[in-house]
Amino acid sequence: MYNIAVIGCGVIGVTTALEIQKKYGGIAKVTIVADKFSPKTTSDIAAGLWEPYLLAENDEEDVIRWSKATFDFILKLWKEGKAKDAGICLQPAVNLFNCKNYNTPKWVSVTLGYNELGVRHLESLSKQYNQSFTGGFMFMGFTWEPILFLPHLQKQFLRNGGTIIEKHVQRFNELEDFDVIVNCTGLEARNLSCDRSIVPIRGQVIRVYAPWQYITYLIQCDDDEDACYVIPNRDSVILGGTKQQSFDTTINKNDTDRILKNTSKINYALAKCKKISEVVGLRPSRYRVRLEDEYIETNSGKILGIVHNYGHGGAGITLAIGCAKDASNLVENVLKIKYSKL
Ligand SMILES: Cc1cc2nc3c(=O)[nH]c(=O)nc-3n(C[C@H](O)[C@H](O)[C@H](O)COP(=O)(O)OP(=O)(O)OC[C@H]3O[C@@H](n4cnc5c(N)ncnc54)[C@H](O)[C@@H]3O)c2cc1C
């Protein structure tokens, strides 16, 4: 029986742990080790919109492959009638750009159909929002809400025979008795893996009660001051946001005012709705998602095989299933090297 530890219980940790259980069935014992659980992870702050966002220099083909695996996973649950338990909601998303260099991203082909917005439509929206939109598209996709699905997936992991341990891991060699360690620590990989290329992209969001808002809007501009988004969830609507490189998790009044000003251009009623909460989360951003195996030697001369899966920026929910599949394949590499017999 192989012993596999997954550090982290956000969206990346839980989906990776489940994928490893699926791949290794009865021949591996999987343990999640984490110091924070739902509803206290960064993942819980996310609206859970399926849309590749803030992904720096990741290869477009990888982004399409990872996000398609997640889309197919969500679609399957939705078709099986599991949407309610899994926190899934089908909804249209309108993306508008006030950017000099606008190109429709290739990932739109993954969705349940999309339309480019025509010149007339853009002109009328530009007038409405007091912008000069250079392009836009609309697609049918999903929100997959972490605060609803994380507890559900955790239970599934336990039902499959997994173990969960609450613990802060200071150094990988604390887990040296495991055959493989899978690192899904998000922004904290900065400390655990001493990886300074992972940085926080600060996201401040306001949740309001607006059950009549069904459509997602994302407005992206060359000047971030004018950018905003509105994403409906099951029990609230998320108004955002910010994307500053910063560790500051306090609520900034200027950001609040700007979010309300910009989103009220989409619908002036949103700014007047009952506020449910306002929070700041730090997106784990890296020039590229780190999905690779690494081998380190402990003081006692033992070689630890580590699989890294972190740095998903503003799209951890969108990429989760595809990255979990790649991570579980890397686990196989580590086991092969360790036992040369899989
Ligand atoms: C405001 C906001 C909105 C967002 N909206 C979306 C969206 O709509 N769609 C989307 O796809 N993405 C969205 N994101 C991005 C998404 O939230 C992240 O990419 C994702 O949550 C990263 O997940 P993770 O599991 O890597 O990290 P986390 O959720 O931070 O989980 C990390 C886990 O590792 C554990 N851990 C860390 N270090 C240690 C240690 N040393 N010892 C033990 N345990 C440790 C933590 O306790 C935790 O369990 C949003 C982010 C923000 C901030």
Image (cartoon, rainbow, N blue to C red):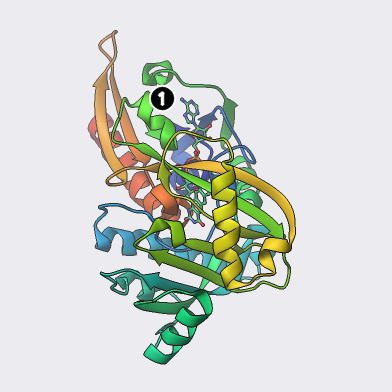
Q: Is residue 233 left or right of residue 305?
A: right
Q: Residue 293 appears at what percent x and percent y? A: 27, 36
Q: Image quadrant of residue 194?
A: top left
Q: Quadrant of residue 41?
A: top right
Q: Nearer the viewer, residue 40 or 292?
A: 40
The residue positioned 32% from the left and 43% from the top of the image is 286
Q: Quadrant of the C terminus?
A: top left
- Measured as percent of width and height from the top left, residue 336 is found at 26, 36
**Camera-side residue of 103 and 330:** 103
Q: Is residue 103 above or below residue 234?
A: below
Q: Which residue appears farthest toward the bottom when viewing the image? A: 120
On screen, residue 3 above or below 112: above
Residue at 37% x, 45% y: name it: 328
Q: Amino acid at mark 1?
A: Phe
Q: Quadrant of residue 272?
A: bottom right
Depicted 125 relative to depicted 224: above or below:
below
Residue 185: image location, x then y, percent = 44, 34
Q: Nearer the viewer, residue 300 or 210?
A: 210
Residue at image location 28% in from the left, 8% down from the top: 299
Q: How far from the left and from the top, in percent, is residue 175?
A: 42, 20
Mark 1 sits on what residue?
A: 178
Residue 278 vertical position relative to residue 35 in the rendered view, above or below? below
Q: Residue furthest top?
A: 300
